[in-house]
Structures are given as C-alpha cells and as structure tokens.
Amino acid sequence: MTTEPIDLRSDTVTVPSDEMRKAMAAAEVGDDVYGEDPTVNRLQAELAERLGKEAGLFMASGTMSNQVALKTHTQPGDEVICHRWSHIFNFEGGAGPAMSGVGFNLVDGDYGVITAEQVEAVIRPDSIHYPTTALINLENTHNKAGGTIFPLGEIRNIRKVADHYGLPMHLDGARLFNAVVATGVEAHQWAEPFDSISTCLSKGLGAPVGSVLLGSKEFIEKALYVRKRFGGAMRQVGVLAAAGLFALENNIDRLADDHANAGRLAEGVNEIGGFSVDLNGVHTNIIMIDVTGTGMTEEAVRDRLAERGVLLNTFGRGFLRAVTHLNVSADEIEKALEVFARIAESG
Ligand SMILES: *Cc1c(COP(=O)(O)O)cnc(C)c1O
C-alpha cells in the first residue's frame, strides 16, 4: 500500500478543494485589462475593505506583488531598508536590483523583527555621496525567521520614524492572515501603518494562484502601469480571483488548526533527541528545526525523513523548515512525529 507523503515543505503545496474548483468554474469573468472582470474587481474590493485601504490590484504571485510595489515606490539607485532575512531581499531572484535598480540596506534582528532605532540609524543622510533611502519594508509573518509575528507596537514606532523622514512603508504580508488569526488583531489594524501591502492567497489560504497589492487609489493607479510593464496584466482572470474569494470566505479561521498543528509538531520534535526547536519562535504555522544535534547534515536528515514519507525543506545553517497547512491533519502530525523519533533512534 502506498500512502501519500506528509508534505510539510511549504503551505504553497496546498491544492484547491472540490468546492474551490466549483467556485472557479462558476466565476463570472471579463477582460481584466479593460477592468471588466467582475470577480477580480470583487476580490480587489473585498481585500481593500478588509485591510482598510482604498484599492487593490490582483497579481500573479507574491513576488510580482512585492516587486511592483518596490518599483512604484522607488527610483533606480534608491535604497530599501529591510531585515537581512526578508523575502524581498533573499527569495525573489534578485528582482529588486534587476527590475527596479534598487539596493537593500540590511538590518539584523531576532525573529525577523527590526526596531525603530535600528531603522533610524540606517536612514541615509541627504548628501550626494549616498544612495537615497526610499522605502522601509517589513514582513509579517516572517518566513525565514519561522512564521514569527512582528509586534504591532514596534511597527507603529517605525511608522513614526518613517513619518519624520517622509518615507513610505511596504508590508510583505504574504501570511498576514496567519498573524490575524494568531493574535486576534484585525487585518486593517495590522495594515494601517503601511502605505502598501502585499498579501498572498496561494499560501495557507489554499488558492492555486494569486496575490493582491493594496494601497491608496493613487498608488494603485501607478502600480497598474508597473504591473503591465512586468507582464502581469491578465485577461479573464476571474477564474483565479474566484479561488481567492473562496479562500477569504472559507479558509481564514481554519488557520488556527494549522497553528495548533505547528505547536504540537514543534513541542513533539523538540522532545526528540538530536532535534531542537526554539519554542519561543513558533507563533504560527512555520517551525524551524535545528538538526545539528543529530550529527547529520540537514540534507541527510531531510532525505531520511523523505524515505519514510515526511517531506521538509532544508533552510541552511543546520535547519529544516516544516510548514503546516490545510492539507495536513492532526493525525498526520502524530505520524510525522513517529518518523522523527525513528530517525533519532536509528540515524
Ligand atoms: C511566499 C512569499 C512571498 C511570495 O512568493 P510567491 O511564491 O512569489 O507567491 C513573498 N513573501 C513572503 C514572506 C513569502 O513567504
């Protein structure tokens, strides 16, 4: 008997449910380049309302959404302040320098958090010698830091610095709804300090494709030109937006299950010899597992887990990353823990 692997590599591996597919098949569509796709328009309006912004723009991916925002906020030669581990710097194929000609001013901080003092310290003086600081980018929840939540108080402190220096702020909110569900702080409260926000429908929310960029009407009007240039103006894309609307309606509250599963997995793995998890860093659906105590490389541990039907990604520095999502059940988490225990025993 072959069983499906327990796939904890990412919440992007989620597949659309039958119900979601039905919603996609039934979507009313039109040519979105003419602004005539009613389902896209509904999704954009729905997210704009939830996040308390004037307008939204559907995007093919989170990378496109972040990069359109970068291009809209900056000029070539400008600099963007962000955490050293941020997605926009590490995982977008060098798009910032390639597409917008920007550099990054990298700040270190625990759990993906940077402080207002740190931000202020790296803002460039107004002088011909320096690049121009043009944007502050934060990430919530923080992917590489392990799904951690950026404290709202610190975001507001950074906003004060941004206001003092006249800088816009962008939020990479690929997993913003995980932060919403984990804290009970509403999406519009998280979004309020930011000029633009990118949020993904294709992660834990379970849509096959799609991100939405939110901001003021004026910002989104500029972003529309940039999206076209980046090849992201699409046609009857309501079939995809319908999946996003279905996800917003049905798959937000259930993120709590993913968080509970991640908590259980983190505690269980942490008790198994050779594995260690910083439980203070487990806030949502991502856990970072330090495997150096096994005496094996992260690749070797990944391969042994995979042979026994548990899939994780390597994440550098001796870490594996596990991500819980709607296609992983509590029972499967228990099964995954048994596999970890067997590997600890047998190597
Ligand atoms: C996944 C992700 C993105 C966007 O990724 P795409 O694969 O391009 O959709 C952006 N930021 C963060 C933090 C992410 O985790």
Image (cartoon, rainbow, N blue to C red):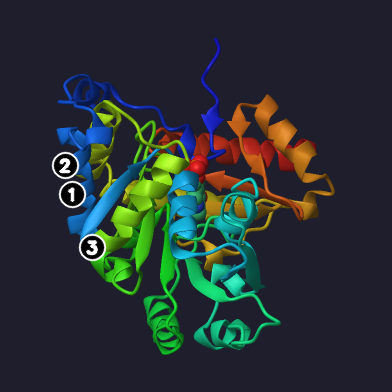
**Toward the viewer: 256 or 108?**
108
Q: Is residue 114 above or below residue 236?
A: below
**Toward the viewer: 160 or 1?**
160
Mark 1, secondary structure of its residue: helix
- Give how far apart the Cα atoms at labels 2 and 3 are: 14 Å
Q: Residue at x 18, y 25 (%)?
A: 27
Q: Give the labeled residue for mark 3.
A: 53
Q: What residue type is labelled 1?
A: Glu
Give the farthest residue toward the right.
295
Q: Give the labeled residue for mark 1.
A: 46
Whether residue 311 sits left or right of residue 179 in the image: it is: right
Q: Examine the rendering and report whether any part of residue 324 can be seen.
A: no
Q: What residue type is labelled 2?
A: Arg
Give the farthest residue toward the front.
128
* Residue 154 in the image, given as x and y percentages of width and height: 44, 81
Comes first in the chain, label 1 or label 3: 1
Quadrant for the N terminus, please: top right
Which picture quadrant has residue 219?
Answer: bottom left
Q: Circles 1 and 2: CB distance less than 8 Å?
A: yes
**Toward the viewer: 300 or 138?**
138
* Residue 241 in the image, given as x and y percentages of width and height: 26, 35
Q: Circles 1 and 3: CB distance less than 8 Å?
A: no
Mark 3, secondary structure of its residue: loop
Comes first in the chain, label 2 or label 3: 2
Q: Give the labeled residue for mark 2.
A: 42
**Toward the viewer: 182 or 248?**
248
Q: Is residue 275 above or below residue 179?
A: above
Q: Residue at x 15, y 26 (%)?
A: 28
